[in-house]
């Protein structure tokens, strides 16, 4: 299974929640589609 993530915008709390859920789902590959850092 693959997980696609995007539009993190520096929100570490939300990213940690998503990563925890991804671990529970036994994801084999995570693909980041961009927008990792904050706005501006």
Image (cartoon, rainbow, N blue to C red):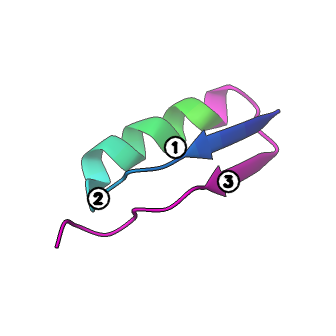
Q: Which residue is mark 3?
A: 31
Q: Are marks 1 and 2 in contact (CB under 8 Å)?
A: no
Q: Is residue 5 left or right of residue 3?
A: left
User: Dot 2 lies on which element?
Assistant: loop
Q: Kindly report the distance in space between the C-alpha atoms of the residues bearing marks 2 and 3.
A: 16 Å
Which segment is the magenta one? 23-40
**Circle 2 sits on which residue?**
9
At a point 64% along the width and 37% down the height, the residue shown is 23
Kindly indicate the quadrant of the structure image that contains residue 26. Answer: top right
Task: Judge whether residue 11 is colored magenta.
Answer: no
Rendered location of residue 31, percent (x, y)? 67, 53
Which tag, 3 or 1, sits closer to the chain's start?
Answer: 1
Q: Nearer the viewer, mark 1 or mark 2?
A: 2
Q: Earlier in the sequence, mark 2 or mark 3?
A: 2
- Numbered label attached to residue 19: 1
Residue 18 percent location from the top left of the image: 46, 37
Q: Check disc 3 and report its element: helix, strand or loop.
A: strand
The quarter of the rendered structure image containing the N terminus is top right
């Amino acid at each position: 299974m693959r997980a696609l993530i995007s539009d993190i915008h520096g929100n570490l709390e939300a990213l940690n929640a998503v990563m925890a859920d991804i671990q529970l789902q036994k994801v084999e590959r995570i693909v980041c589609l961009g927008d990792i850092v904050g706005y501006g």
